[in-house]
Image: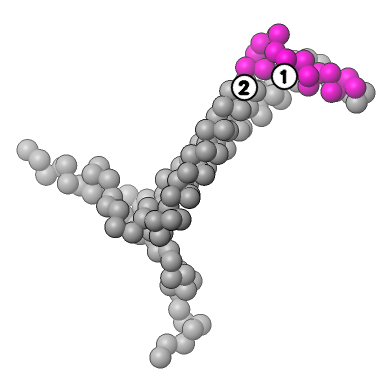
C-alpha cells in the first residue's frame, strides 16, 4: 500500500491526465463530455471576444460611432472632462486586449483532447517518413 502523501498531484485526479510530446506541447486528456464542454465554451468565448473587440476598434476609429458617442455622453454626465482622442485610444486598447483575451482562451481550449483521440498528423511525425 502506498502512502497518500507520496502520490504526485497529477495522479490524484483520476479523470484527467497530461501528456507531453517532443515539442513541449502539453495536452490534457479528459472525458469526452468535458472535452465537448471545454471546446464549445472556449470557442464561444473566443468568438464573442473577437466580435466585441472589433466593435470597440470600430468605435475608436469612426467619428460617427454610436458607441463612442454614448461613452462620451456617459463621461460628460458624470462630470469628467476627457479629450476625445484619449477616449479613442483607451477604447482601441481595450478592444485589442479583448481580442487577445479571446485568442488566449481559444489556445488554452485547444490543449484538451478526449481519451482515444490521436494526435494530429503533423505532431505525430507520420508524414515525415514519406518519400
How far from the left and from the top, in percent, is residue 35?
42, 52
Neighbourhood count class around disc 1 (C-alpha, 10 Å): few under 14, some 14–19, many 20 upward: some
Q: Position of residue 49 (x, y in %)?
A: 58, 33
In the picture of the structure, the residue carrying the numbered disc 2 is: 55
Chief SS of the magenta region: helix
Q: Alpha-carbon neighbours of circle 2 within 10 Å: few (<14), some, or many (≥20)?
A: some
Expressed as whole percent of the image width and height from the top left, the position of residue 51 reads 56, 27
Residue 17 sits in which quadrant? bottom left
The residue drawn where x is 70% and y is 21% is 89
Q: Dots 1 and 2: beta carbons under 8 Å?
A: yes
Give the mark, 1 or 2, whose residue is nearer the N terminus: 2
Q: Is residue 57 magenta?
A: no
Q: Quadrant of the C terminus?
A: top left
- Residue drawn at x 29%, y 57% is 116
Compared to 85, does 13 lie above or below?
Answer: below
**Left or right: where 116 falls relative to 25:** left
Q: Residue at x 37, y 53 (%)?
A: 113
Tell me: residue 72, above or below residue 30.
above
Is 65 or 93 nearer to us in this picture?
A: 65
Q: Which residues are magenta?
A: 58-77
Amino acid at each position: 500500500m502506498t502512502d497518500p502523501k507520496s502520490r504526485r498531484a497529477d495522479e490524484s485526479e483520476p479523470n484527467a491526465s497530461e501528456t507531453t510530446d517532443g515539442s513541449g506541447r502539453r495536452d490534457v486528456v479528459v472525458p469526452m463530455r468535458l472535452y465537448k464542454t471545454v471546446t464549445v465554451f472556449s470557442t464561444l468565448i473566443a468568438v464573442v471576444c473577437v466580435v466585441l473587440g472589433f466593435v470597440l476598434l470600430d468605435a475608436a476609429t469612426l467619428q460617427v460611432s454610436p458607441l463612442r458617442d454614448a461613452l462620451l455622453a456617459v463621461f460628460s454626465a458624470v462630470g469628467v472632462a476627457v479629450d476625445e482622442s484619449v477616449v479613442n485610444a483607451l477604447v482601441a486598447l481595450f478592444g485589442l486586449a479583448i481580442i487577445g483575451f479571446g485568442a488566449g482562451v481559444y489556445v488554452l481550449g485547444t490543449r484538451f483532447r478526449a481519451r482515444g483521440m490521436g494526435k494530429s498528423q503533423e505532431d505525430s511525425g507520420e508524414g515525415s517518413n514519406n518519400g
